[in-house]
Structures are given as C-alpha cells and as structure tokens.
Image (tube, coloured by chain):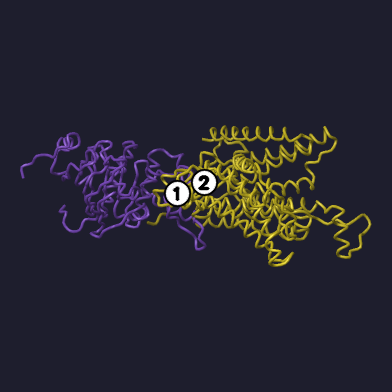
Chain colours: A purple, B yellow
Amino acid sequence: MSNTGTPLVEMRDISISFGGIKAVDHVSVDLYPGEVVGLLGHNGAGKSTLIKCLSGAYSMDSGEIYVNGEKATINNPRDARHYNIETIYQTLALADNLDAASNLFLGRELVTPLGFVDDARMEAETRKIMHRLNPNFKKFADPVSALSGGQRQSVAIARAVYFNAKILIMDEPTAALGPQETKMVSELVQELKRQGLGIFLISHDIHDVMELCDRVSVMKNGQLVGTERVADVTDDEILGMIILGKRPERAA
Amino acid sequence: MTDTSHTSTPPANPVKPTDGAFARFLKATELDTRMIGMIGALALIWIGFHVYGAVVNGYGAFLTPRNLWNLSVQTSSIGIMACGMVLVIVTRHIDLSVGSVLGFCAIIMGVVQVYLLPSILGLGHPLIWIIAVLCGVGLGALVGAFHGFLIAYGGIPSFIVSLGGLLVWRGAGFLVARGETISPVDSTFALLGGGPYGAIGYTGSWILGLVGCLGVIAGLLYGRRQRIQFEFPLRPVWADAFLGLLGCGAIIGAVLLVNAYPWPRGIVRQYAEANGIEMPEGGLFISHGFAIPVLILVAVALIMTVVMNRTRFGRYVFAIGGNPEAAKLAGINTKMMTIKIFSIMGFLAGLSAVVASARLNSATNALGELDELYVIAAAVIGGTSLAGGVGTIFGAVLGALVMQSLQTGMVLIGFDAAIQRIVVGGVLVLAVWLDILYRGKSK
C-alpha cells in the first residue's frame, strides 16, 4: 500500500497533560483510508489518552487534527461523530440498565414524526445489524447487564459500525474476549478495511497488531517512539520499541 | 440487507414446560411481578386497617368512599413531587429541598394573589388564579434550575446543594411573609385543592372514565399493530384482552367509588339555597366525582411516564443513571440534562405548592415541612433505586399512596403521631430491604 494522497486523519503535535504530568507529549500520527494503524505501548504510555483527543472525550492542550486534509475542531464526542469518527472504548461505554437497541442508538435515537423515540424501529434495525455481526445474539429485550462479555462487545461494535463510520477507533477490542469472539473481531476488522475505513487499533497484544495492522505507532512515556510498517519490522524490533523505546536500526 | 429469518422469531419470554400456571400467566401478560407485589401490599394495608377498625373499634372506616376519596386528595401533593423525584434519583442525585421550595412557592403565590393582584386587578378577578399558578410553577422551575446549575457546573454534590436549599428557601419564605399565614386564597385558586366544589362531579367523572377506557384500549391496539409491523412476538389475544379489562375495570371502579361519595349535608343545603333548588325528602345526593388535585396528579403521572419512556430526554435520564460516563461519550450533554431534571423537579414542587396551599385555603410558612422525606420515601418504596438507572413514575405514585395510606389508616384507628412516624419509617426500610431481596433473586 502506498500511503500517498490525503490522509484520512492526521494528528499533529498533540499534547495534553494532567496536573503537570505530560500524558501525551508532542505526538503526531496519521491514518489513510483502508488502513489499520496499531497504537502500541505499555499501560500508561498515553495511547488511550491520545486517541481520546480524537474521539472528543478529552480536549487536547495543543496540537491540530486534520480530517481529510481539513482542520477539524473536536471538543466533545458529538463533534467527533460529526466527522464520522466512531469509537469502541475499552470499557465499552454501555449503559447497563438499557437494552441493546437503546445503547446502539444512544444519543442518536430514531424518532417518530411526533418526536417520540421509535423503539420498535430501533429494535428492528438492531436485529438486522446484530444478525450480520453476531448471528447468535438473541437477547434484545434484556438490559445489557444481562449479556456476556462477548455479547456486550458486539453491541459496542454494532454501535460503531451501524452509523457508517469513516474512521474507527478500537481501544483494546479483544481484551475481554474468548478465542471465538476474537476471531470475529479480526474478521470484522478485515471487512471494514476492505470497505475503505481507517482504523486505529489500540492494543498491547503484539500478535493482534502484527496480524491486523499495516503500520504501528509505538508510544512510551507519552512520547512517540516511532511509526513503522509492519512488513518491515520483526516482532522483536517492535518489542524493543515498546520496552526500550529504541527505534530499529536499519540499513536504508 | 433484507432478512426474512425473523418470521419465526421465538417469543421474547419463551414458556418453559416447567412453568406453573401463574408463571405462564405472567409471561403472557408481561406484567411486572414487582408491581403486582406492590399492589398486593397496598391491598393488604387497606384491608388490614379496615378489619382492625371493624374488630377493635367496632367500625371499619378505611374502605369507605369517603376515606378513599380523601386519601386520593391527600396523596396528590406528595405524588406530584414523587414523579419528579424519580428523575432526580434515577440520575443518581437527590433533592432534599422540595419541601422548602414548596413552602416558598406557596408563600410567593399567597403574596401575589392576596396582597399584590387584588389591588391591581380587583378582588376576585378571573385572571388572579392563573397568574398566581404561573408564578408558583415558574418560580419552582427557576429555583430548581438554579440548583441544577450549581450541581452540574459548580460540581457541588446534589445532597449539599439541596440541603442548603432546604434551609435557604424555608428561611426565605419566612422573610417574605414575616412568618404570617396568608389567607384566604383566591376562590377559584382554592378549587385546585379539592373539596366539594373542587371536584368534577358525577357526569364529568363518567365522561373522563370512559375517555380513559378508550385510551387503554387504543394503547393496547396500537401496541399490537406495532408488534405486527415489526414482526415482534405478540402477546396472546386473551392476555391483551385481560389487560384491557383490568385497565378499564380499574378506571370504572374508581369512577363508581368517587361518585359514591356524596357532598356533606351542609354543603348540599347551601348549594340548594344558592341555586333555588327545592330540597326533596331525605336530602339530595350530589356526588363529588374526581377531585381536581387528583386529576392534576394523574395528568402529571401520565405526562411524565410518556416523557420517561417515549422521549429522548427520558432515554437520556436512564442512560445517565446507568452509566454517566457512557452517556457523556454518546454525546449527551449531561450538564444541561441535570439542569433540566432539577428544573422539572422544581416545577413539580411549585405545582404541589398550588395543590397544598389551595387545599388549606392559605399559605403558611410550615407548608411542606418534611415533605422531602416523604417524597423520597415514596419514590424509593415505588422501586426507584438510589444506585441510579432504575425507577418508574407509576411505582412512585403507588409509593406515595402506600405512605399516605399508612398515615391515614393510623389516624383512623386512633394511633398517635409518634407511632405513625415509627411505622412509616419502619415500612420504608422494610420495603427497600424486600426490594433488595427481590432484585437479588431475579438476577
């Protein structure tokens, strides 16, 4: 893949600090259509924080975000959704007391002409998309607190996919899943990639990343160690970046 | 993406062969067992007081049209506020200030309609009651919005803001009226509190009851149509028919009850003299019908139920209660929601002030004292979880009815105020404990 042309997302020189601690320190990453970029690093390396600036959960202190080459202003999750940026959070961000359909459409409910929420239509739409993503899913009437980890995950994924995301952020999407469900997520990532979405995949599982990603950006202590094409590096070299913060030496 | 595999969707609650008749019945009707339990408890309380009165005092006074009519009026004020408290508690907040806000709004309405407006518009002007009511509910909504603002943008816990409000607004009411009782209120305004003239009478009650029955049937038919359109599992016809009969039966029963309570003889005589009616042998039987404050409560409960279950606003209330962080990440403006929720609570406290001061025919400084506790208790007994995310309007109204039934019942059988408080407090704790047991089991 040749990464020429306009990147889907470009985050330039992003910084954010909490109480004097620089959680993200002048980091730049980019993402092209049809590409999966992995964000790697230890716990506390700043990957989730960086990506929350893109999804609107945090406001960055300095830096710029460009979407399709145009400067984007993202101050809250609504702004991010406006740019077709969807996020699957590590915590899944589901309201446990609501059913799958209510969670899927949370903040973007379908309404009847009179302005009332159209629960029947939302449930029908949810049945459709869940049938595609996870045909075993049957618990449409129960609150999501009654679902298994994998089922909850599929609700969170359905929410991101349903609304035609152009840019998808997945924060540890397989952390809580069994092998079967992990495979489901991998297949989904491949399919979305073919559809031309750009995906940021946050993970600390290096095997996930080597399998699914085209490029990886490694972070350590809030700083970007470097960005490499997966095809050009070995597992050990990436581990070296994560643990030692050392860029692989390469004969150019 | 067309998909035809839904045609064979199994029912949402598949009946298992091991289910007994009652379990089958519950699954078919989709009735909430918790709600049935509450109604059962209420029935037990009513019958208990009646039987106790009949056995010990020789006269069962509880299950009489007169007592039940009065009970409905007494429940109104707490019930109206309990509807708002559900929203507050579902979003993991609390409002301790509602009793004081009620008192403050009542004093301001008293000043407006007794001191201010008559001197401008003239005594008994038909606009006076409308302006007074608007002042009351508007002021309540403003006070509530102010509380909500402090909580959302100031980051002050709602417990503290409303605890402060409890003291501030009680004191403010005292200052405005210098501690005096303002009385009597405008004569039209007084009708909003109930009483023989503040009820809609025999014919009006029947008309309203029939409209209610039509509403129940229309609702069931609409539900069936929606389910057919989206190919969701249908309730069996007999279950829908049963629900329709139950709803209509309850409404018609209520109409028969309120129409069975006649005006007192003195009022009838006054009325007959004023209208030049000849008093027949044995006196006139003039029915009360539904009291206006009760109708206000019913209207508030219906509107709030629709708001909670059928609007985005209501959906967000539950979402915030279930997971505030998720609600924020879903793009919900949770701060503005907090302001709106507290503003609705304040509005309803203002409306309760209308009912309470109209019923007393005066605005006193003590009006609404301790109401905050009864309102919270009503919501909690009605199944609203203090952990947030769970609660129904209907449950809260039922909770208010339980609280009021206990108090009324103990007055009727001659228990004094000290014992009343002990029992009400005990029941509150017991109800929540039973609820915890129930929820633990149903998981």
Residue A225 rendering spot, x and y as whole percentages: 18, 41
From this viewpoint, is residue A217 visible? Answer: yes
**CA–CA distance in space, label 2 to label 1:** 46 Å
The residue marked by circle 1 belongs to what chain?
A: B
Element under disc 1: helix
Left or right position of A57 against B135: left
**Quadrant in which the C terminus of chain A appears:** top left
- Dot 2: element: loop
Q: Is residue B345 left or right of residue B271?
A: left
Q: Which residue matches tag 1? A: B153
User: Can I make out residue B4 in this image?
Assistant: no
Which of the labelled discs sits on residue B11, or is there none?
A: 2
Q: Position of residue B169 (x, y in %)?
A: 60, 48
**Looking at the image, is B150 positioned above or below residue B132?**
above
- Residue type at mark 2 is Pro
Q: Residue furthest right?
A: B281
Q: To which quarter of the image does residue B215 belong?
A: bottom right
Q: Which of marks 2 and 1 is in front?
A: 1
Q: Position of residue A156 (x, y in %)?
A: 38, 46
Q: Which of marks 2 and 1 is nearer the N terminus?
A: 2
* Quarter of the view holding residue B37: top right
Check disc 2: other Cα within 10 Å, few if <14, some if 14-19, many if 20+.
few
Mark number displayed over residue A49? none
Location of residue A170 with respect to A242 vertically, above or below = below
B224 vs B165, nearest the viewer: B165
Q: What's under tag 1, amino acid-wise?
A: Tyr
